[in-house]
Image (spheres, helix red, strand yellow):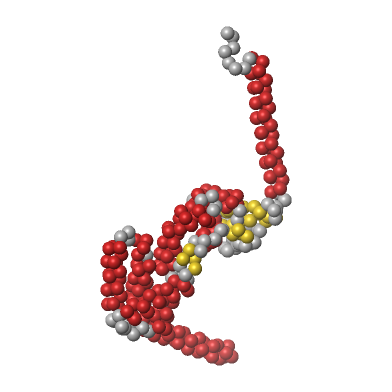
Amino acid sequence: MKNPGIFGAMEMRILRGCMSLAIKNQRFVQLCRKLVHNWLARRLKSNGAEDLVTGEVPKRPVVFVDWPARRSYTFEGNTIRRLMLDRVLQSSYLFPTYGFPRNPYTNVDLTYLQYMCVLNQLRAHQITHWALEALLSCNYDMGILKKKFGETIGQHIMNTQLTTLNSPEAIELVHQFIDDEHDRNGEHFCYELYMWGLNNRGGMNRIETWIKLCRDYYMLKYNFATMEEMTKEILRIRSRAKDICSLPPREIMAKKASIFKQKLLDERARQRSAVGSPVSSSTE
């Protein structure tokens, strides 16, 4: 038996010829697609070479295309990364509300392909983020993201907001926590003074201690697995809060008085300078 295979020699030659033609055809199609893509790319309108936020030419450029609008958009890598994270990790009163990344020029959500394109470029620049990677691992599905990473995102938002206090909601939450602890311990609460202290907290140990206690309290469900551990932590927080409540807020009052005094001195110096300038010019 000369040919034990399924096909004879003639059939094999025909099959190889067909496969060769098919491969050449696929290469031809890919070449045509590349040519068409490059042709369209040269005819795209651009948002310009400067970054939207920095106003400078990006050092780590990230580009994506809106094909229906025939426009290309260029950003500094850190800019588009921050804008995307602001959407994915957005929150209301420290609870995640989630949102798809958007094109800041059009305020339209990025498509799945646009998001993949941007994320691959961020990876190449080595400035990606776990939350952005998580969204892609969920096939750009916000419902799946909530189920798989909701607790992790909630923990991240709570910890970040109560560390930086960069939102009115976070300041209000800490302020309410301090108010509740004063009420629990039967101590007088200086509402306006503490609000001022939270908005001007630099260098005040008392305020920083309150912020840490508040963060520890709201992070209980993330940091402790058993009710016994949570109870011990609550007792520690309330014991420390009781000690602080019993002391008058002299540090905050001193800091406020110091800032007010400096502003007054600066204003007087400005007034003297304004009054003295015409005199000096007339003398000359």
Res 49 quadrant in image:
bottom right
Give left or right: position of 121 versus 36.
Answer: left
Which is more toward the observer, 33 or 101?
101
Above-or-below relation of 254 to 227: below
Taking the spot 69% from the left edge, 36% from the top edge, the residue there is 29
Q: Is residue 250 visible?
A: no
Counting from the top left corner in percent of width and height, residue 236 is at: 27, 70
Furthest toward the top, the residue is 1
Count of marks, rendered view: 0
Report the quarter where the N terminus lies.
top right
Q: Is residue 104 visible?
A: yes
Counting from the top left corner in percent of width and height, residue 91 is at: 49, 66
Taking the spot 72% from the left edge, 45% from the top edge, the residue there is 39
Furthest toward the front, the residue is 227
Which is more toward the observer, 241 or 123?
241
Taking the spot 50% from the left edge, 89% from the top edge, the residue there is 272
Above-or-below relation of 116 to 272: above
Res 7 quadrant in image:
top right
Counting from the top left corner in percent of width and height, residue 161 is at: 44, 67
Taking the spot 44% from the left edge, 63% from the top edge, the residue there is 157
Counting from the top left corner in percent of width and height, residue 279 is at: 56, 91
Report the quarter where the C terminus lies.
bottom right
